Image (tube, helix red, strand yellow):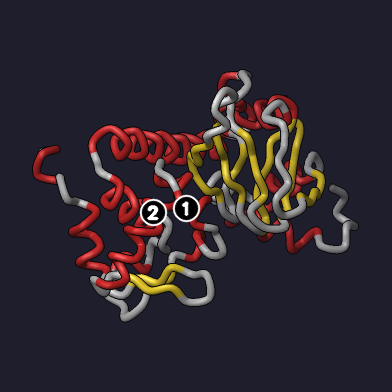
Amino acid sequence: MNHTFPLYLHYRQRLAKSDLFKTLSIDTLDDMLKNFRFETWKKGSQHDSKLALQRFYVIVEGRMELIRINPETGKAFTLMILKEGDVYDVLSLLDSREHDVIPVALDDLKLLSAPMSRVRDWVHKHPEFNQNMMPYLSQCIRVREEIATDLALHDTPTRLARVILRYIPVDSSQHQADEIKAELLHDLSNEQLAQLVGSVRQVVNSHLGKMKKEGLIHMDHHQIVVDDLQRLRIKAEAIHGLLQ
């Protein structure tokens, strides 16, 4: 990306907000941006996982879901939803192997992408970039561990509560509020939500209805809104005592 690009300063600012690129100097960001190009993915488009062997993506605007599909049954499971500032794919960056997930654009996506080989060079060339990599990778591992634990130890209503909590804004979860929107889950169909939970649409529909009756959540224009954060946390930690 050339510095004469009309939105160059805008995208440099967006890049600087990403956890991987925060703390980097303006000179370093400018040096890196020379290797980035701007891309757009249409909402609903699916992309080959082999893309991540060649290019490294930073989400500038929109959401991306990473899904796994059983080729024999067609059953899908959503590993996670990535948001603005997240990157795809840190695993392929580190081990140069294909990550068997399908990236799907949940919105019209705006991305910055750079050659994967060049990003690997930055890990060695820029210690501050490498230092940012460790906590980001740690967070990715923790999320995957939580998902594995949810599927192995929790029933469907507990997993649903945990998914909702996972995708509410972090700062909102730190204080009591009348209503908290699960912003990253907006406009998801119940089928897509079921893929996040590891269940089927009919079962998730039923448990959403029960949560509404219990006064835990309500729906507002295809948006899950948390009405009682404390009680939702209790539901999400239903077997917490067994894990001590």
Which SS class for mark 1? helix
Please name whichever residue, 30 or 58, is drawn nearer the observer in this view of the structure. 58
Please name whichever residue, 44 or 10, is drawn nearer the observer in this view of the structure. 44
Q: Quadrant of the C terminus?
A: top left
Mark 1–mark 2 CB contact (< 8 Å): yes
Of the numbered discs in the image, which one, if any, rests on residue 204? 2
Residue 72 image-quadrant placement: top right
On screen, residue 226 versus residue 238, left or right, reads: right
| Residue 118 visible in the snapshot | no
Three-letter code, disc 1 = Leu
Q: Where does residue 243 sit, x and y in percent of width and height?
A: 14, 38
Mark 1 Cα-neighbour bin, 10 Å: few <14, some 14–19, many ≥20: many
Of the numbered discs in the image, which one, if any, rests on residue 145? none
Q: Where does residue 229 sit, x and y in percent of width and height?
A: 27, 68
Mark pair 1, 2: CA separation: 8 Å
What residue is rendered at 65% in x and 44% in y? 104
**Is 123 rendered above or below residue 189?**
above
Q: Where does residue 182 sit, x and y in percent of width and height?
A: 44, 65
Mark 2 Cα-neighbour bin, 10 Å: few <14, some 14–19, many ≥20: many
Instruction: Of the two numbered discs 1 and 2 on the same chain, state the one appearing first in sequence.
Output: 1
On screen, residue 172 versus residue 17, left or right, reads: left
Residue 204 image-quadrant placement: bottom left
Closer to us: mark 1 or mark 2?
Answer: 2
Q: Mark 1 sits on what residue? A: 193
Three-letter code, disc 2 = Val
- Residue at the extreme right: 4
| Residue 22 visible in the snapshot | yes
On screen, residue 89 versus residue 9, left or right, reads: left
Q: Where does residue 208 sit, x and y in percent of width and height?
A: 36, 62
Which SS class for mark 2? helix
What residue is rendered at 15% in x and 45% in y? 239
**Is 167 rendered above or below residue 130?**
below
